[in-house]
Image (spheres, rainbow, N blue to C red):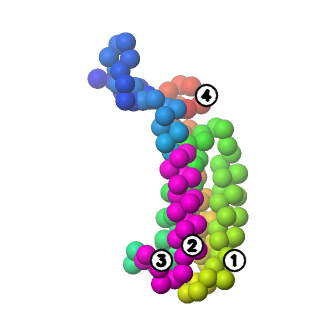
Amino acid sequence: MNCALTYGFTNASGYAVIDQNRIKLIARLLGWLAVIVIAVLSLVPGDMRPHTGAPGTLEHVAAYLGTAGLLTFGYGGRRSPVAIILSLSFYSAVLEIAQIQIPGRHAAFTDFVASTTGAIVGSALAWIVLKALERISGSGSV
């Protein structure tokens, strides 16, 4: 059975199809949920924040990679990946500065760099996937 770029339903020919708009909406919602989760985890006192056991910089890279990837994929051609990267980078800087006032937390330039690196990689990977999907579907935008 051939699977088109739309999924979850079948078309008249019986092919599985994906509702691209629904997937993008879900990606956008998950991306914005991730933005909120990052704020909560960044602004709670140090003794209340859950720890994964991974190095802090890796946690920052992973959090922003996932967030940027979801937002870039979710917005597709409607938002520039560069705008998403710059917005998340600015957001990480604001959160790092805000941590100065929170007990058990500290601002760290290395955390800002890790967050920005994650945003760059996540957005780039999502952009690559979007471009690959465009080539597969033969359309100008996915």
- What residue type is disc 3 on? Arg
Q: Where is residue 3 in the image (x, y as percent from the top left)?
A: 36, 27
Q: Mark 3 points at which residue?
A: 49
Name above or below for residue 34 compared with residue 102: above
Sequence-wise, which precedes: disc 1 or disc 4? 1
Mark 1 to mark 2 CA distance (whole Å): 10 Å
Tell me the element at label 1.
helix
Q: Is residue 70 visible?
A: no
Q: Name the residue under label 4.
A: 140
Residue in the picture at 60% in, 42% down? 75
The residue mark sitting in front, 4 or 2, is 2
Quarter of the picture holding the C terminus: top right
Residue in the picture at 52% in, 71% down? 41
Q: Where is residue 57 in the image (x, y as percent from the top left)?
A: 52, 75
Q: Name the residue under label 1.
A: 97
Sequence-wise, which precedes: disc 4 or disc 3? 3
Kindly check if marks 4 and 2 are in contact, taking CB atoms under 8 A apart as contact: no
Magenta residue check for 67 = no
Tell me the element at label 2.
helix
Tell me the element at label 3.
loop
* Segment colored magenta: 28-51
Sequence-wise, which precedes: disc 1 or disc 3? 3
Tell me the element at label 4.
loop
- What residue type is disc 2 on? Ser
Kindly check if marks 1 and 3 are in contact, taking CB atoms under 8 A apart as contact: no
Name above or below for residue 43 compared with residue 122: below
Sequence-wise, which precedes: disc 3 or disc 2? 2
- What residue type is disc 1 on? Ile
